[in-house]
């Protein structure tokens, strides 16, 4: 029950019990039960929240899989069209290549030692 307070020693627990008796008197058992119910409701709520997050992740993965499958089916459908209209297939490939970002390579420098190092080439 007090796992959320792992650093409490005997003296601290005794002080809390004395304060509880002073503040709540005969109602201390009832207050303890209410506190226990509240803690269990919080735990249950956190468990439900975690379960919902897991379900959302599963749904997201399923949605990504369906989207990837749909794209593969579309690409498979373009193969016969590419055979009947190769000029349109080349235009489609060119448009697709224009939409993708370029991958730039870092320039290299040969310093004469046989090792090629990344950097800018020296100016002559």
Image: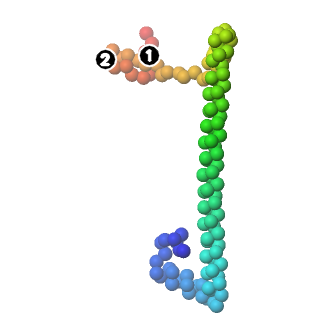
Q: Quadrant of residue 42?
A: bottom right
User: Which residue is more in the foreground, 120 or 56?
Assistant: 56
Q: Can you identify the residue that label 1 sits on?
A: 121
Q: Judge from the rendering whether residue 30 lies leftward or rightward of residue 11; answer left or right.
A: right
Q: Under tag 1, what secondary structure?
A: loop
Residue 73: percent from the left, percent from the top?
64, 27
Q: Residue at x 62, y 65 (%)?
A: 44
Give the alpha-carbon distance from disc 1 to disc 2, as whole Å: 14 Å
Sequence-wise first label, 1 or 2: 2
* Residue placed furthest toward the left: 113
Residue 85: percent from the left, percent from the top?
68, 10
Q: Residue at x 65, y 73 (%)?
A: 38
Q: Can you identify the residue that label 2 sits on?
A: 113
**Dot 2 surroundings within 10 Å: few (below 14), some, or many (20 or more)?**
few
Residue 53: percent from the left, percent from the top?
62, 52
The vertical placement of 122 against 37, above or below, is: above
User: Which residue is more in the foreground, 110 or 25?
Assistant: 25
- Residue 34 visible in the displayed image: yes
Q: Residue at x 64, y 82 (%)?
A: 31
Residue 103: percent from the left, percent from the top?
54, 22
- Residue 91 visible in the displayed image: no
Numbered badge on residue 7:
none
**Dot 1 surroundings within 10 Å: few (below 14), some, or many (20 or more)?**
few
- Callout 1 touching callout 2 (CB < 8 Å): no
The vertical placement of 37 against 77, above or below, is: below
User: Which residue is more in the foreground, 6 or 80?
Assistant: 80
Q: Residue at x 61, y 76 (%)?
A: 36
Rendered-image quadrant of the C terminus: top left
Q: Quadrant of residue 61?
A: top right
């Amino acid at each position: 029950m007090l796992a959320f307070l792992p650093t409490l020693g005997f003296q601290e627990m005794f002080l809390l019990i004395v304060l509880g008796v002073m503040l709540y008197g005969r109602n201390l058992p009832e207050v303890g039960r209410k506190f226990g119910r509240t803690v269990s409701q919080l735990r249950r709520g956190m468990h439900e929240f975690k379960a919902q997050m897991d379900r959302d992740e599963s749904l997201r993965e399923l949605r990504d899989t369906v989207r990837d499958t749909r794209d593969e089916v579309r690409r498979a459908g373009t193969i016969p069209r590419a055979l009947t209209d190769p000029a349109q297939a080349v235009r489609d490939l060119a448009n697709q290549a224009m939409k993708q970002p370029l991958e730039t390579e870092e320039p290299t420098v040969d310093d004469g030692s046989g090792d090629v190092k990344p950097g800018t080439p020296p100016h002559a």
